[in-house]
Each structure stands twice: as structure tokens, then as C-alpha cells.
Image (cartoon, helix red, strand yellow):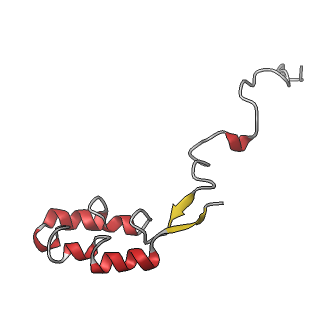
């Protein structure tokens, strides 16, 4: 036993390397991450119908709706959104 009354070999039920235990801090390590402008990336997701910019356009509706004359250009299949997705989107390098 140590000076403070604990055993150096007991009490630990989970053994192994720290990298084997998944936590929120290390959950994405070693996985491919989307680039910033990808539809799932930090900036690109803001332009989807669930994001801040795309969601506001959906609320306004009309031509700004995802199926409207202007809004459909910003989808991943539209001329603007598709161009951004193909040139700046996709997967980035591994996170580690």
C-alpha cells in the first residue's frame, strides 16, 4: 500500500491503453472528416435546410425555398452548391 492508503495494483477495473477508451475528446481521431465547405462540413452545413442560412431561407420560402428558383441552386445538386461541393467539398485528411 502507498502512503495515502491505496493499493497500486487494485481498484482499476478497466485496463489497457488510454487510446482504446472512446470519449468525446478522442471520438473522431483517425476518422476521415468532411472538408469545411462540404455539405457536412463546418461552413457547408450552414447552407443546408437544417443550417442557419438554409433554414432561414426555408422559413422565408418562395423562391428561396430548397425547391424554389433561387434556393435550388444552393443544394448539392444545384449549380452553385454543386460547384462548391465538387471543388471544395469531400473528405479531408484523417484527423490525427
Residue 56: x and y in percent read 22, 65
Q: Residue at x 14, y 66 (%)?
A: 60
Q: Residue at x 84, y 21 (%)?
A: 7
Q: Splitting the image into 4 quarters, where does residue 96 fall?
A: bottom right
Residue at 17% in and 72% down: 64
Task: Identify which residue, 44 or 11, lies in the foreground.
Answer: 44
Q: Residue at point 80% right, 20% down? A: 10
Is 10 placed left or right of 13 in the picture?
right
Q: Is residue 85 left or right of residue 14?
A: left
Expressed as whole percent of the image width and height from the top left, the position of residue 12 reads 75, 25
Instruction: Choose between 6 and 19: the one closer to the eye.
Output: 19
- Where is residue 71, by image quadrant? bottom left
Q: Quadrant of the N terminus?
A: top right
Snapshot quadrant of residue 32: bottom right
Q: Percent x, y for residue 16?
A: 76, 35
Q: Is residue 62 left or right of residue 29?
A: left
Task: Tell me where residue 43 appears, x and y as whole percent.
Answer: 41, 69
**Horizontal arrangement in the rendering, residue 20 relative to residue 64 (left or right):** right
In the figure, 70 relative to 52: above or below?
below
Amino acid at each position: 500500500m502507498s502512503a495515502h492508503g491505496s493499493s497500486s495494483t487494485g481498484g482499476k477495473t478497466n485496463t489497457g491503453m488510454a487510446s482504446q477508451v472512446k470519449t468525446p475528446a478522442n471520438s473522431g481521431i483517425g476518422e476521415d472528416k468532411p472538408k469545411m465547405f462540404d455539405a457536412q462540413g463546418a461552413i457547408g452545413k450552414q447552407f443546408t435546410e437544417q443550417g442557419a442560412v438554409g433554414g432561414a431561407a426555408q422559413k422565408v420560402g418562395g423562391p428561396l425555398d430548397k425547391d424554389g428558383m433561387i434556393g435550388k441552386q444552393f443544394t448539392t445538386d444545384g449549380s452553385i452548391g454543386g460547384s462548391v461541393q465538387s471543388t471544395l467539398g469531400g473528405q479531408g485528411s484523417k484527423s490525427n
